Image (cartoon, helix red, strand yellow):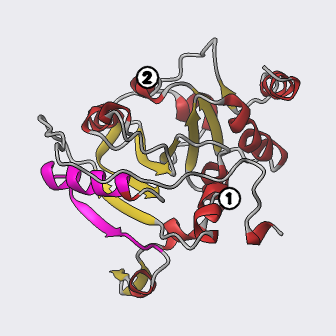
Amino acid sequence: MGKNKLKKFAEMETFHNVFQPPYEPMAGHWRDRYFQNNHPIILELGCGRGEYTVGMAERYPEKNFIGVDIKGARMWAGAKEAEQKELRNVAFLRTNIEFITEFFAADEVDEIWITFCDPQMKKATKRLTSTYFMQRYQRIVKPNGLIHLKTDSPFLYTYTTEMLRLNPYPVLCTTDDLYGEKSDEATVPVQGKEIALYADARALQTHYEKQWLDRGMSIKYIEWQLSPLTAWEEPTIEIEKDTYRSYGRNYQTSSDI
C-alpha cells in the first residue's frame, strides 16, 4: 500500500463520520446514536468519493445520508469534505455491500442511490441491481422505499430494465438519456405544481459522470419502488456487453480545465 493511501487511512481514523472495522453496532440506531434526529435515511451504495452523499446532504439538510463502499482511500475524499463543511447529516460506512443487512435494521432505510457502479458483466450476483441484492435491500428499506440507479452502462441499464420487467416493482421513471430533450420536458404534478421528474438525478454530476458526458455518452436513470416481494426471477436474456473503458484517474474533463 502506498504512503498516500496509508496517510488517508490514518486520517480516516480521526473522522467522526466514518464507520469501519472494528464496527460499532449501529443497526437500528443510526438516528438516535449518530444523527440524533428522526429524519429519513438515504444510502449511496458504491459511493466511491462520496460525491452524491455529500452533495445530496447539502441539498437536503432535512435528510440523513450514508455513503457505503469498501474502498476507504476513495471514501476519504467525501468524508473529509463533509468534516470540513461540518455536515452533521452525513456518515460513511466502509464495508462490502453484500453485508449491508448487518448494518441496518428492518425498515431503517428510506431510499437507496446506486451511482455509476461497476456493471459486473461477468456475474449477475455481483450487480447491485440484481435480485440477489434486491432481496437484501428489501430487508432494510421501508415498504415502497425508493431505489435510484444512475449509470453510464448500457449493459447495466438493459439488465436492470429486464429485472424490473420480470419482478413487479413499480417503476416511477426511466430514461436512457437523462440529459436529453425528453428528460428535459418530463414533469409530474405535485400539490398542483409541475415538478421536474429527474431533478435530483440531474442536480449532481460525479467525477466519472463528467467523463462519460465529455465523451458524448448518454447517462441512464431508473427510479423504482421496493414493494414487498416473496419470490424473484433473475433475467436470463443475452445482453450485449459494454465495449468502452474508463479514462485513467488523471484524466481531466473539459469542465475541470
Q: Position of residue 122 (x, y in %)?
A: 36, 35
Query: What is the x, y in percent for residue 213?
Result: 59, 69
Q: Which residues are magenta?
A: 155-178
Classify 184 as above or below 173: below
The reply, left or right, for residue 101 in relation to residue 201 is left
To which residue does mark 1 refer? Answer: 58
Q: Is residue 125 left or right of residue 111?
A: left
How far apart in space, not on screen, are marks 1 and 2 (Cα)? 28 Å
Q: Position of residue 95 (x, y in %)?
A: 55, 25
Q: Earlier in the sequence, mark 1 or mark 2?
A: 1
Q: Which quarter of the rendered picture does the C terminus lie within?
A: bottom right
Q: In the picture provided, is 236 more to the left or to the right than 30?
A: left
Q: Identify the element where label 2 is drawn.
A: helix
Q: Can you say whether 16 is above or below 242 in the image?
A: above
- Location of residue 30 in the rendering, given as x and y in whole percent from the top left corner: 54, 31
Three-letter amino acid code of the residue under disc 1: Glu
Residue at the limit of the structure toward the front, as seen here: 243
